Structures are given as structure tokens and as C-alpha cells.
Amino acid sequence: MSDKNQALFERAKKVIPGGVNSPVRSFSSVGGVPYFVRNAEGPYVWDEEGHRYIDYVQSYGPMILGHSHPAVIEAINKAASCGTSYGAPTEKEIILAETIIERVKGIESIRFVNSGTEATMTALRLARGITNRSKIIKFSGCYHGHSDTLLAAAGSGVATQGISGSEGVTESAVFDTVVVPFNKVPEIDQSIAAVIVEPVAANMGLVEPDSGFLQELRKACDSSGALLIFDEVITGFRLSSGGASSWYGVIPDIWCFGKIIGGGLPVGAFAARQELMSHLAPIGGVYQAGTLSGNPLAMAAGQATLELLGKAEYEYLESIANRLVQGLKEAISKSNLEISTPKVGPLVGIFFSDKKPSNFEEVKPIAENGIYPDFFHGMLKRGVALAPGPYEVLFPSLAHTEKLIDETIEIASDVVKEISPIRT
Ligand SMILES: *Cc1c(COP(=O)(O)O)cnc(C)c1O
């Protein structure tokens, strides 16, 4: 065994804050040294020391086909050979737009940006521009990227860092952000431009919307004239080809996408019916732009990914998610630990508690009970990479075979035997 990861981490820390370009990657909430990835293929990543991991991070969601899928790599190579960015429109943007519009009921028009953060940030601007109202409602524990307005009580890395919001975000930046608990329909008055929600919360572990919650939210928005924004950056093309809106039969006014639609390249998008999108420049007065937006490599990778996602693929993903959840439950029932494993379609979360939390307040004490870091490191040592933080979900991909799921469960059985549920 070499100490290459350690050496790289030290070197990285000298030139990159905390050694990472996104905080969760630093292992700050689980302790230890991050593995530096050398390459990845299918369900696996290899680190610079040559260790192989069964990967459930999958770049936090984009790699639904698994890593380095030949069709995606070929699409990227082919696109790259024609140039990498032009500052002029391309047919590739139309093709991906048409693909998304065809699959997600209610969308008529879409604009591509470079990240999920940009998508939600601009969706809010659009909603404010359309309604001429200033306030927005977000749910505690829902993560919508790191724009100032939305960095209030966010989940994921923000939760992991133990900061509510962030230094550097001024009071005036979040003055119009109203934070309310998930799974409870808030009071929505005439000052509210939009309500933004992760239809399935997947950045505070996995928290499913209670039955009727999204439907009631839709009604409450309608009666107050606020726009409903679904942040489908994780759920889009993951829950089903129509995403969460089709899964739950609730049509928002504005959708936000990212992750899967870029096939592993930087991308984001927001979408709505024509009438709403026509408020955007150059047609309307809401400004939004991007030098690299609709980047041809990202469009090609996204299109290649979506083309490989059909009914059978979603059924398979759900079946291995079921297998994983059942297996984990059985493994843990034989240990001293308690577990609840919320699952929506192919999305899986793990809470080390017999309770299934329904909002961020309920999630926090479970996520912080100290068991996850032990589980994480036990798994990693035995070749399974989970996200290095208790607020993330698992992302089994189409490249994860049933055999690999079973192998993961066996490893988990060994790991949980070593973990004491007693915390001081
Ligand atoms: C990842 C994520 C974002 C932010 O996307 P980035 O591409 O990281 O900026 C926004 N919303 C949700 C629900 C996400 O999971």
C-alpha cells in the first residue's frame, strides 16, 4: 500500500482550498483522506493507489449509465473533433431540447446553462420577472445549488459543513428567502413569486414527499399566483423518463435540471411552457446568458445518455434499488444497529435509526449520530465507495449488476458487525 492519496491530498491543499473543488469531497464530515480517482469504468472507480471501489457516488447522480459508457465517450469524442465551443447555436442544442420536451409532460421550451446552481438561480429570476413579486419560499434541507438567495438552510454539503447558509451571504441576499419545513404546505401570500422544492428531497438523505404534499403545494401556489418550481436536478431522468413531475402527477410551472442531462459533463437547464419562457431575453426582459451554455460536448453526452434510458432501464434500476434496500435491511437486522432505508423508484437513502424522518429537523439528529462515518469507512476499506457525508443518497447505476449489489450487501453485513450503536 502506498500513501499516494495522502501525498496528493497534501499537495492539493497547498494549491486548492481544502484540497478540493467542492466541499463534500474533502471527507471533512467523515474524517480521513479522500481517495484521488485515477479512472473509472462502469460501476467502479480506481484510486491513484490502485484500489478499486464499487462506486455509489457516481458523481452524485449524473452517471446513471455507469462511468465511461462507450456510447457517451464516443459521442463526446465525435463532438470534440468538431470543435469544443463556438459562441453560435448548434443543432445539438435543439436535439437535446427536443428529447427533453418529448419526455417531460408540460415542458415546451428549455434553456441550457452550465450547472444546477445556474438553473435554479435563473429560475428564481424568471419567476420574479414574471410575477413582479420578490419573495421566494424554499424548504429546509432542500439543496438548490450555491447561489446566494438559495444558500439558506440548504442540505448536502452545507448541512455537512454545519453552517446554516454561509459566511459572505448578506442578510439582504436572503432577505426575500422564506425557509419552511419540508412536507408541510406553507402559507403562501401575494408577496411570494415562487416556491422551489426538490419533489423528492435527496440532499438531506432521502426524504419522500408525504402523500398529497406536492398536490397540495400545487393548489396553494395556484390560489396565490405563486409559481411552483421543481428542482429536478437529481430526480429528472432518474425517477422515470418524465422525472418526479410525471412520477407524482404534479406539473410545476418551472423545472430545473442538471446532472443526468449532461452525461457527466457540466450542464444545467431550466424549462417551462412557452408563455413563461418567453419572458427570457432575447424575447423578454429577464436577462440570462452564458459563454459556454449549450456546450456541444455536454449536449452530445447528455443526448447519448438519454437515448439509452428507456422503460426497461428504469425497471432495472428500481429492481436493483429494491435488492439493495432489502439486503441492507436484512444485514442490519442481524447487527446491533437500526436502519431505515427510504426508497423512491431507484433512489435510495440510508438513515441509521428505526425512524424514517420526514423533514430536515428530524434528519439532523440521525445524520449526526456518528454512525455514518464508521459505516462509510468500513465500506471504503472493503472496496465500496459511498458519498463521504450522511446527507447524501446512493446512486446505483445501470452498470451495477445484481451480483455487485449482493457483494455490496455482504460487505455491509461485515461492516455493521463492527459498529457499536452506543455513542457518547
Ligand atoms: C446538485 C444539485 C444542484 C446543484 O447543481 P450543481 O450542478 O452542483 O450546481 C441543485 N439542485 C439539486 C437538487 C441538486 O442535487
Image: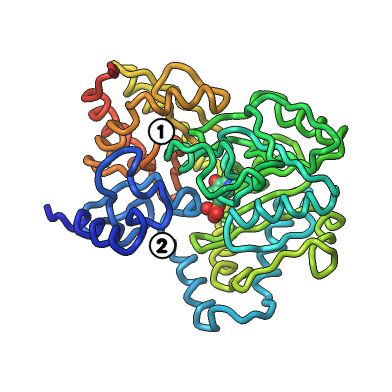
Residue 263 % position (x, y): 52, 60
Residue situated furthest left in the rendering: 1
Q: Report the front residue among 412 and 204.
A: 204
Identify the residue position indicated by label 1 in the image: 324
Say which amino acid is labelled 2: Ser
At 47% across and 76% down in the image, what residue appears?
77
Q: In which quadrant will I find the C terminus?
A: top left
At 79% across and 31% down in the image, what residue appears?
188
Q: As displayed, is residue 413 above or below residue 355?
A: below
Identify the residue position indicated by label 2 in the image: 68
Q: Cβ of disc 2 within 8 Å of ligand 1?
A: no
Q: As displayed, is residue 128 above or below residue 94?
A: above
At 32% across and 61% down in the image, what residue appears?
39
- Calculate the distance from the C-alpha at mark 2 to the C-alpha at mark 1: 23 Å
Q: Does residue 346 show up?
A: no
Q: Does residue 286 show up?
A: yes
Residue 384 % position (x, y): 30, 42
